[in-house]
Amino acid sequence: MATKYNFLKPYTFKNGLTVKNRIVIPPMTEAAALENGAVSQDELRYFDIHTGGVGMFITPVLNVSNDGKGFEGEPSVADDKFMPGLTKLAHTMKQNGTKAIMQIFDAGRMSNSKILRGVQPVSASPVAALRPNAETPRALTEDEIEQIIEDFGQAARRAIQAGFDGIELHGANTYLMQQFFSPHSNRRNDKWGGSLENRMRFALEIIKRVQKSVQEYADDKFIVGYRISPEEIEEPGIRLDDTLKFIDVLADQPIDYLHISMGYAWRTSLNDKSDDEPIIEKIKKTVNDRLPLISVGSIEKPADAEKVINDGITFAAIGRESIREPNWVQKVELGQEDSINYQLSPTELDSLGINAAFLDFLKSMNADLHWVDKKEPKDDFDKKLGGVEGN
């Protein structure tokens, strides 16, 4: 077994949970759940093929309530009726010691009335996203905000009871948790909006409610992560200064890791082109070893992952590369790096568990999957603010 890489070393969280290595599969939408949100056999087959090597595997995002659904083929954790499929999913992912993490969210205004079967999407304020064909959402009432917070708590309970090792709160990629933090989507003048502290409140209350479920239903090694996007390009929108202040607060919350959602791990500011310091370095300084970090974005080769780990970042996440090569970690461990697949052939789709729905979704995102013998245009993931690895 190869031992030259630091990313193959285990990591133990403060609560005692040990992860066998520092490689993570980030949440990647595969759009293959059943229409009602139940886990499908195609999904189980995909996870069965791709798990077992990495230390942690994070699911594609699951909605915590019916009105929080963001896209077709999205799995749901909004009801106890989904528990049989979720239990199978956790069991499937936890092969060979891989830890299974469920990512949960509410899409907020990043949905539409067609996906919600005639229901108007909601958000912090009635402000449409700056996206083509975006619908204007309805502003949430105080009672509805409290209900969504409760929905996150119930989703955490279901994840625990289904056998997952942790959850990840999706506070990134312009979904509802980020919408409350953003001055573009949050124009409220009550306790949920206005000042920076008020715009943090929704996320902090969700963390508090989730921890209540963890304390009641989980053992002491269940972990809670948080995913965040550092910037928005909207005006007004989230800028790095506010993000770093928010991260400083998050680092003292009862969470176990912070996952930085970017299309390129070493990306610099989208808004201040004169600032050439990678955002991950700014975040690392702010966190100051209070939380482990997951870095994601265009990490493909072992050297890419090792660069992340050697920079003092705890975990490296391989997204698109894990689609092409489900045995990436195993091949590195066996010293078979020369056999790692960095290209994808149409003839391999079935053996990789990539069904038609997943392939259509990848094409809709213009994902650069490095097709064999086909020149694909380089996808600008910085501009897309997440791409495939943004879930």
Image (spheres, helix red, strand yellow):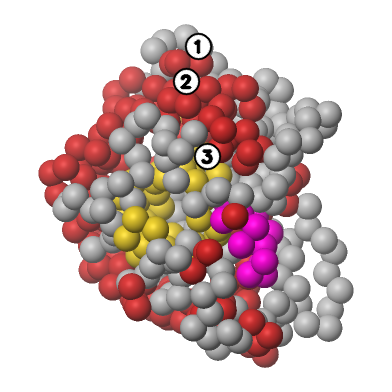
Residue situated in front as seen by the camera: 267 or 312: 312
Q: Residue at x 28, y 61 (%)?
A: 164
**Span colored in magenta:** 295-309
In the image, residue 47 sits, relative to residue 10, either above or below, namely below
Q: Which sits earlier in the primary sequence, circle 2 or circle 3?
A: 2
Quickly name the residue at label 2: 199
Residue 296 is a magenta residue: yes
The residue type indicated by label 1 comes to Ser
- Estimate how packed mark 3 is, as few (under 14), some (14 to 19) or many (20 or more) residues with alpha carbons within 10 Å: many
The residue type indicated by label 3 comes to Ile
Residue 105 is a magenta residue: no
SS under mark 2: helix
Query: What mark, if any, has residue 308 been given in the picture?
Result: none
Q: Residue at x 69, y 51 (%)?
A: 264
Q: CA distance from mark 2 to mark 3?
A: 14 Å
Quickly name the residue at label 3: 228
Q: Which sits earlier in the primary sequence, circle 3 or circle 1?
A: 1
- Estimate how packed mark 1 is, as few (under 14), some (14 to 19) or many (20 or more) residues with alpha carbons within 10 Å: some
Quickly name the residue at label 1: 195
SS under mark 3: strand
The residue type indicated by label 2 comes to Arg
